[in-house]
Amino acid sequence: GAQGDTSQRSQRRRDMPQSHASTSRTRPLVLAAGCFAAAAAQAPGAPIMKHSFMAPFEAVNDFTGMRVISDWELGGSAVAHRGFVRLTAEKQSQKGWIANRNSFEGGEWSLAMELRATGESQYLFGDGLAIWFTTAYDVIEGPVFGREDYWTGLGIFFDTFQNVDQQHHHKHPYIYAMVNDGTQHYVPDAEKKLDKAKQILPGAHDNSGCSFDFRYNEARQDVSVLNHTRVHITYSASQRRLNLRLQQTSVGHDGEWYQCLEAKDVELPSSGYFAISSATGDLVDNHDIMHFVVRGTEGVDNVDQDHQAWLDQQKALAAMQQSELDLRPAEAVQRDYARALAAHTASLKALSASVDKLQQQMEFQLASIQAGGGLAPPT
């Protein structure tokens, strides 16, 4: 996981009271049995915009010339491009994060994130990224995927670096979730002998995570800028249940959802702050985020079907925007002219659909050049 380099800790500007945190000590999550009830018929809830962001990012700071995202703070190596937020580039010893400025209060929620982890190396890469829901507003740079240790709340880790581990042989990339009460030390390496009551050890218990290859090797000719990984996380305070599933996407195709975590007896703070962080060490990767969308799920019977309804809603909206390119003259007297017009309209639609892909590819290549890396292969 994250490299254990020492970082100068700075004074917190503000920290939420920890009275809402779980009274139990840090505990790995256990697989829960069963499934949710039948799908609810209601329309999916709208994103809570003060806790969400979605590309494209158009706003620019007049003084710095850098793109900014409303209600979110970028730090470290994180940079907002028009089509994505790059937390770390393919460069050594980087730490970047994006943190929500607004406290979230609510026990029933759905989180959708789309990420892209890529690099030129086929076998050696790292370190990974993390999703946070903690009582701390500030992100202090530290050793846990770019953030400080001893957090209070939830950390979900997307670990691409294979640590030396003699007790548990997980295939990486490895994804796992952990709840901390603020007193536990994160230890990614099982060979470090510490007091078990005072440390967090990934994989120390069965069913506390899953292996899922969410990373893309840029050397492959079939890799496109549209190869993304979708992450869907749901939490229910009333059921004390946390679910996480993943889906791979490519050009014109969405893969099957993979159930990674279905954990019970999970108690999170009643209010907290969302954030995403990432780090590289000696090994490197690009870690990009396309969107991060939070929606309330109070009263929703089936959160997975609710999420699919929201995805279908987004696709329908995109299709409607494309339909606005139709050219419909008042009179199309000549048949040949009508055919030519229809063909021209189809070409315009195809061209418009390719603009975002091309722009994101150019941004991706430009970001690689700025970071000192090479160009991505043509797609």
Image (cartoon, rainbow, N blue to C red):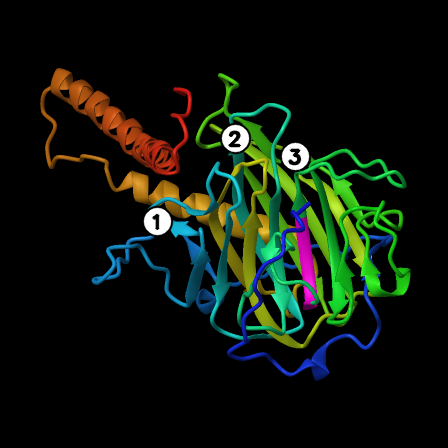
Residue 367 spot, x, y in % from top left: 36, 38
- Lateral position of residue 35 relative to residue 81, left or right: right
For the residues labelled 2 and 3, the Cα–Cα distance comes to 24 Å
Q: Mark 2 — residue?
A: 119
**Residue at the image point whose x is 66% and y is 38% from the top:** 160
Figure disc tally = 3
Seen from the viewer's position, the closer of residues 212 and 112 is: 212
Q: Amino acid at mark 2?
A: Gly
Q: Mark 3 — residue?
A: 256
> In the image, is residue 182 part of the stretch drawn in magenta?
no
Identify the secondary structure beneath mark 1: loop
Q: Is residue 287 above or below residue 263?
A: above
Number of the front mark, 1 or 2: 2
Q: Are marks 1 and 3 in contact (CB under 8 Å)?
A: no
Residue range corresponding to the magenta coloring: 151-157
Q: Amino acid at mark 1?
A: Pro
> In the image, is residue 155 part of the stretch drawn in magenta?
yes
- Lateral position of residue 261 relative to residue 74, left or right: right
Whichever of labels 2 and 3 marks the residue nearer the N terminus, that label is 2
**Residue at the image point whose x is 46% and y is 26% from the top:** 224
Q: Mark 1 — residue?
A: 56
Whichever of labels 1 and 3 marks the residue nearer the N terminus, that label is 1
